[in-house]
Amino acid sequence: MNIFKKSKKEENTDEFHKDYGTISNCIFILKKFRKYRPSLIFFLFAGAAAGASMSYLWSFIGKLVIDMIERQTAGGGDIMPLLWLTLGTTVAEFLMMWLNNYANIRLDVGFTYVRLMIIRERMAKVMTMEYETLESPDMLDRLQKAKRATAGDWQGVQGMMTYMQTMLLQGVSVITAITIMSTFDLRIVPVIAVLSLIQFLFFEYIRKKDKKEMWDAMAPHWRKLEYMETVATDFSYAKDIRLFGMKDFLSAKQHEVNSIELEHWKKSRQYWIYNTIFFHGIRAVSQVIIISWLIWGVVENGLSIGNFMLYFSGANTFSGAVTQILTSLSGLRERSAHTDDYRSFMDIPTGNEKGIHVPTADRYTFEFKNVSFKYKGQDTFALKNVNITLNAGEKLAVVGLNGAGKSTFIKLLLRLYDVTEGQILMNGTDIREFDRNEYYRLFSPAFQDVTVFAQTMAENVSMSSPANTDKKAAEEYLRSAGLGDKIDKLEKGADTQILKILYDDGIDLSGGEKQKLALARALYKNAPIIVLDEPTAALDALAEYRLYRSFDDMVGGKSAVYISHRLSSTRFCDRVAMFKAGELVETGTHEELMALDGAYAEMFRVQAQYYTEDKDIFQINDKKEANINAE
Ligand code: ADP
């Protein structure tokens, strides 16, 4: 148990984990202060100076007062200077107390502010990381650890800040004490330091024992208690507990765990009593040594009573400060290990460090060349040797059974994942060479699993702040995606908040409504390539029909990739790409593929029955639409 030596860390095999060390982490924190709130550095020092002076003020003034009284008793004289000194000291103490408190408040608030900014940096980092990496369990673990380092005011980074503050204050106290004692005799300093070290080592011993035997050993019992709490209060258990009369049985079980906890507490209290006894024992030894040292000073060197007081208080403050520095150092090192987790996470490359600009062009052509792809941790290829070109302005229908690789094809085109083999070219350049964010701007996507955000409906379309939202355009697109009736029914129209998580008056949308919203979102973005992944899966037949009908209008002359398991979508696309078990098996127009009589034709025939239904729906809907228009 040596706090000065690096404690044995659990073996860390994570390639991204780095041990930065406590000093480097302290510098890291100071740099964050400088970046976000430079005044904190001033208040750290001002608070430490004021705090340390307060602990010495009265002992120093006490010495002056006693010296004065001694002089006056010897020769008589004026009492006024004494009164002035006392008054002046009281004012000085008051000012220092004020400065100390003021600095502490500024530091407390400032530390929290800096921690919140550090959290913001972490969240910003997560949002710029490669999509693919966020799927990996290792990365999620790293993220979890980085979160823990910013979780509260006593943990990780903010814990370090608080310990740095304490150490600075106690450091100033120690230097002041040594300076005072150097005017007499410094030999007492190492003696007190050793006694404080012994006191601290015993404290550490008890702390670790308590942690192991109380907190760590109790963890499974607390889990049980938590479970029982859930069972007793969770509505879903309520029926069984009542109808099977389980109350007494569960209460008895809880009592059993309570007894275990009480035993642990008793043991824990005992340990801390030992610590208190030991602490006072060492303190008594220390006092005896200090007093003997001072008596020796009086006898041998004619130490005045004033100085006796001064050195006595100096030695005691020194002793307390050394113990506190050691305790803080131990806490600082513990928090520093968590700060390592945070910094290691922040240092992971985002994968978008250096990319070339995406050229502005009138036409964008994409070419898949021998593309194969395997998801991380999977043995089989989700896509195998795909070769296809998406010409500018072309509308491509991507079809195939579930699991055929349609979504994977799109994810590669959007560069949410990078190919495992082969390459994807955009106007002749490998898409991996481009700046990721610029590349993303080329696409207007609508995914089947639509995510809505806790913001207004219009902002859910613009996907931007209110200031950057063209509300009129957003509403127009919402209407053309089929949400006109919905908006008209809402009191605040497109300004209605979605989700209740941030606003009580927020609304929820149905699956179909969300899909329409996603379409409006894609149209609003107005990017050169529209990518729609099963955009009609949650739509009712009429809505789907309307979408098919207006598809050409919506897309205009842009390129579009349209995934659908319903083959009826192929009727308004220029070309069909048929995927089967990860392979692109056929490409051509609907007629060409029917003539080929391969996988597409087979799938078409299997769906023929639904087609007939679809056709019926189309006919019915055509009539409905005609009636609506006639009205
Ligand atoms: P489709 O869109 O044609 O239904 P997908 O492209 O979603 O098919 O899936 C192709 C294959 O890849 C399937 O076997 C699927 O289980 C697998 N797959 C899809 N997404 C992931 C993922 N994130 N991790 C691992 N395997 C995946």
Image (cartoon, rainbow, N blue to C red):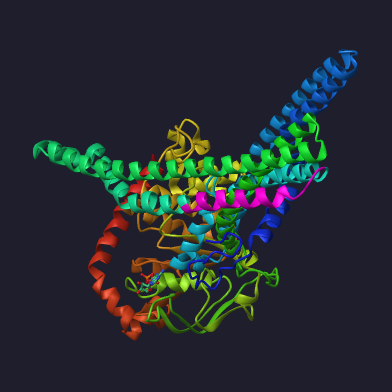
**Number of numbered discs visible in the structure rendering:** 0
- Ligand 1 appears in which quadrant? bottom left
The one of 337 and 359 positioned closer to us in this rendering: 337
Q: Is residue 85 above or below residue 114?
A: above
Query: In the rendering, at what x and y percent does residue 202 appear?
Result: 51, 51
The one of 99 and 271 positioned closer to us in this rendering: 271
| Residue lying at 16% horizontally and 40% vertically, measured from the top left | 252
| Residue lying at 79% horizontally and 41% vertically, measured from the top left | 300
Q: Is residue 270 left or right of residue 616?
A: right
Q: Is residue 587 visible?
A: yes
Q: Is residue 310 above or below residue 452?
A: above
| Residue lying at 40% horizontally and 62% vertically, measured from the top left | 534
Q: Is residue 156 visible?
A: no
The one of 167 and 199 positioned closer to us in this rendering: 199
Segment colored magenta:
184-205
Q: Is residue 158 magenta?
A: no
Query: In the rendering, at what x and y percent does residue 251 appear?
Result: 18, 38
Query: In the rendering, at what x and y percent does residue 473 appear?
Result: 59, 46
Residue 77 found in image quarter: top right
Q: Is residue 206 above or below residue 399?
A: above
Query: In the rendering, at what x and y percent does residue 163 appear?
Result: 62, 47
Q: Is residue 405 left or right of residue 54?
A: left
As drawn, the residue found furthest toward the front would be 299
Residue 631 found in image quarter: top left
| Residue lying at 45% horizontally and 32% vertically, measured from the top left | 505
- Most common secondary structure along the magenta stretch: helix
The one of 468 and 41 positioned closer to us in this rendering: 41
Q: Is residue 285 left or right of residue 580?
A: right
